[in-house]
Amino acid sequence: MMKNKRVLVKFSGEALAGENGFGIDTSILKFIADEIKTLVNSGIEVGIVIGGGNIIRGVSAAKDGIIKRTSGDYMGMLSTVINSIAMQEALEHVGMEVRVQSAIKMEAISETFIVRRAQRHLQKGRIVIFAAGTGNPYFTTDTAATLRAIEINSDMIIKATKVDGVYDKDPKKFLDATKLNELSYERAMDDSIKVMDDTSVALAKDNNLPIVVCNMFVKNNLLEIINGDYSKCSIVQKQNN
Ligand code: UDP
């Protein structure tokens, strides 16, 4: 499965916030940085995308009609830049080499996304954090992460979440919800499932990119996945039958 020894890990912004749901909890940043470090030390090239939901989401910012949706989305994209800079610091703190590449030009803060340059950083063992989503409103960071994963020839996208995988229905609402260890892209797009938004799942499907969903707070989870152990997660990929 790890043909290119390259992964893209997507973290939601919300996960960075910890208990209070807003801002950035540095102990969580440190935990993630240590997890990513184990991947790099195992010879894996790592790209990262972080959402912005702990600061602003376009839809919520625009809900009362004062802020336009497009502006709200740009505010959301800027939130991902804030999170990316924080993550860069945490990774450098644990001795990693990191570059942030933003989809929106911000030359005093980060590099601008250039795929060939990103590839070069990865080959040199640097972690690349892709910030500002796709650079376009009406998209999500899940779609941005899927897009970047495909652009850098990642073996898979790992969606690191607060849950340990994909369930047939919401496990918070239904006691009989069961975890799906493996599922098709078509199933992942079912309304009851919602692994990621349909745009990102469709993009992954068209490009045959496996999506692995795991709990980001379980130590060594990412390492086990890249070593081929999918027992503690769910995987969305092409089904042969
Ligand atoms: N966003 C956008 N275009 C993109 C990626 C993100 O407009 O390509 C905006 C959108 O408003 C989104 C916000 O940035 O709500 C934060 O991203 P997201 O909601 O995906 O973050 P997460 O839920 O992963 O924390």
Image (cartoon, rainbow, N blue to C red):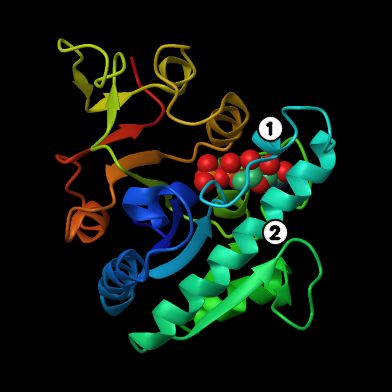
* Count of marks, rendered view: 2
Among numbered discs 2 and 1, the one appearing first in the sequence = 1
Q: Is residue 65 visible?
A: yes
Report which quarter residue 73 is drawn in. Answer: top right
Q: Where is residue 180? Give x, y as percent.
A: 24, 22
Residue 82, by quadrant, is bottom right
The image's mark for residue 159 is none
Lateral position of residue 86 relative to residue 159, left or right: right
Q: Is residue 3 left or right of residue 219?
A: right
The residue beneath circle 2 is 78
Mark 2 closeness class: few <14, some 14–19, many ≥20 residues within 10 Å: many
As displayed, is residue 174 above or below residue 122? above
Amino acid type of disc 1? Val
Element carrying mark 1: helix
Residue at image x 47%, y 16%?
186
Q: Which residue does the image show at 75% across and 33% down from the upper left?
A: 62
Camera sees residue 146: no
Can you identify the residue that label 1 sits on?
59
Is the C-beta of the residue carrying label 1 under 8 Å from the nearest atom of ligand 1?
yes
Relative image position of residue 172 (x, y in whole percent): 26, 21
Question: Do the CB atoms of the residues marked 2 and 1 lie less than 8 Å apart?
Answer: no
* Location of residue 94 by image quarter: bottom left
Image location of residue 77, percent across then percent down: 69, 53
Q: What is the spatial separation of the Cα atoms under label 2 and label 1, in whole angstroms?
A: 14 Å
Residue shown at 54% from the left, 51% from the top:
51
Instruction: Give above or below for 221 relative to 126.
Output: above
Q: Mark 2: which amino acid? A: Leu
Dot 2 lies on which element?
Answer: helix
